[in-house]
């Protein structure tokens, strides 16, 4: 039996999966705010409760924001900043009470889940994208997440927007220190801000997508701009990684027009004949549960 934990900024979700991927138990608790130690204790509490429910010790996978730095052994780049600078793996193993614990970035877990038994099942190379309050990404090859030398493999959100138009330069300063990062164009708050700047209307990202589908002209124009920026950004990934599938996750993955408009747009940017591109762009089969399921699948052999 394997347990997956999705350690988020507002909630800690846990799941126990059987050998064939069947969900056996699930638990969700709020993430303690402000204290690193309380967060560790809460994660261990969810693991122990799930182990009690399924009747024995399990292998545990944990998806978390940011990355464990290979150089220092400490968490870096986490938007839940209280995790940064801590040896999260060591502290979690100590609190859980055994060392059958694997950690990976939350975008990697989404990708592992969808490659294991989700939308991209059977695909050899999968790029997973989180489009939400931030923009993250993960790479899975043959079912395994690619970590990388700096543990930043797949972190495309802090590259600059490719092929910027004149009115897209220089772009906004990002919290990471960069200027015009993909995240500053493609996150939910970024889409909302762009729309408000152009039209003076305050709509949330998913509301803009819905308005476009209902025929709203302002929203349609904005979504075309968004899809073109996403296509430019993903074309760079395709040129380097050439994945079989790209699976979107996060709140903006519910915008249905992305799955038709973006592959149409990326034909102009990918280094291949226009009609020969076979990389598929897909919504996540498990929706919001992909992260927690992928954490459990960090133990494919369990
Ligand atoms: Zn950035």
Image: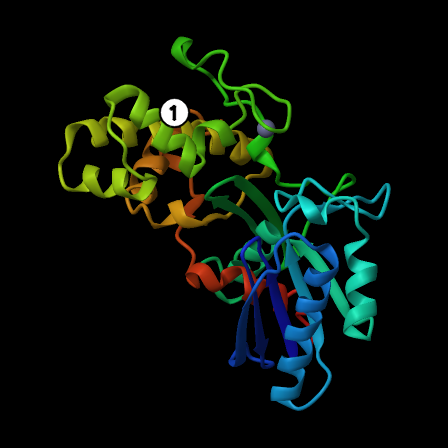
Q: Please determine whether, in this image, residue 66 is positioned above or below residue 41.
A: above
| Residue ID for mark 1 | 268
Looking at this view, is 90 or 145 the one in front? Answer: 90
Colour style of the rendered protein structure: rainbow
Residue at figure coordinates x 68%, y 40% from the top left: 77
Residue 250 image point, x, y percent: 45, 49
Q: Is residue 147 in view?
A: no
Considering every residue shown, the one lying at the far top of the view is: 166
Residue at figure coordinates x 57%, y 19% from the top left: 179
Image quarter in which the N terminus is found: bottom right
Tag 1's secondary structure?
loop
Residue at figure coordinates x 27%, y 32% from the top left: 202
Q: In this view, does 278 lie to the left or right of 117?
A: left
Question: Mark 1 packing: few (<14 Cα in 10 Å), some, or many (20+)?
Answer: some
Hey, which quadrant is residue 49 in on the image?
A: bottom right
Considering every residue shown, the one lying at the far right of the view is: 72
Image quarter in which the C terminus is found: bottom right
Residue 138 image point, x, y percent: 60, 47
Residue at figure coordinates x 47%, y 11% from the top left: 169
Q: Is residue 132 in view?
A: yes
Looking at this view, is 291 or 85 the one in front? Answer: 85
Residue 114 image point, x, y percent: 51, 59
Q: Is residue 102 left or right of residue 10?
A: right
């Amino acid at each position: 039996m394997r347990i997956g934990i999705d350690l988020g900024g507002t909630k800690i979700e846990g799941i126990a999966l059987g050998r064939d991927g069947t969900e056996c138990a699930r638990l969700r608790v709020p993430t303690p705010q402000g204290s690193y130690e309380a967060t560790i204790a809460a994660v261990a509490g969810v693991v122990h409760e799930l182990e009690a429910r399924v009747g024995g010790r399990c292998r545990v996978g944990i998806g978390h924001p940011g990355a464990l730095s290979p150089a220092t052994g400490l968490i870096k780049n986490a938007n839940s900043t209280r995790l940064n600078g801590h040896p999260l793996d060591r502290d979690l193993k100590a609190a859980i009470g055994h060392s059958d614990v694997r950690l990976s970035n939350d975008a990697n877990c989404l990708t592992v889940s969808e490659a294991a038994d989700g939308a991209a099942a059977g695909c050899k190379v999968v790029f997973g994208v989180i489009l939400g309050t931030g923009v993250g990404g993960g790479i899975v090859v043959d079912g395994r997440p690619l970590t990388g030398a700096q543990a930043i493999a797949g972190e495309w959100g802090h590259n600059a927007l490719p092929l910027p138009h004149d009115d897209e330069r220089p772009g906004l300063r990002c919290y990471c220190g960069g200027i015009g990062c993909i995240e500053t164009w493609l996150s939910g708050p970024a889409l909302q801000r762009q729309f408000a700047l152009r039209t003076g209307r305050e709509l949330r990202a998913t509301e803009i997508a819905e308005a476009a589908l209902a025929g709203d002209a302002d929203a349609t124009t904005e979504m075309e701009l968004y899809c073109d920026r996403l296509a430019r950004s993903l074309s760079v990934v395709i040129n380097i990684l050439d994945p079989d599938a790209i699976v979107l996750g996060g709140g903006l993955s519910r915008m249905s027009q992305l799955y038709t408009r973006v592959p149409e747009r990326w034909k102009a940017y990918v280094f291949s004949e226009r009609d020969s591109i076979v990389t598929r762009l897909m919504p996540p089969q498990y929706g919001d549960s992909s992260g927690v399921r992928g954490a459990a699948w960090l133990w494919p052999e369990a």
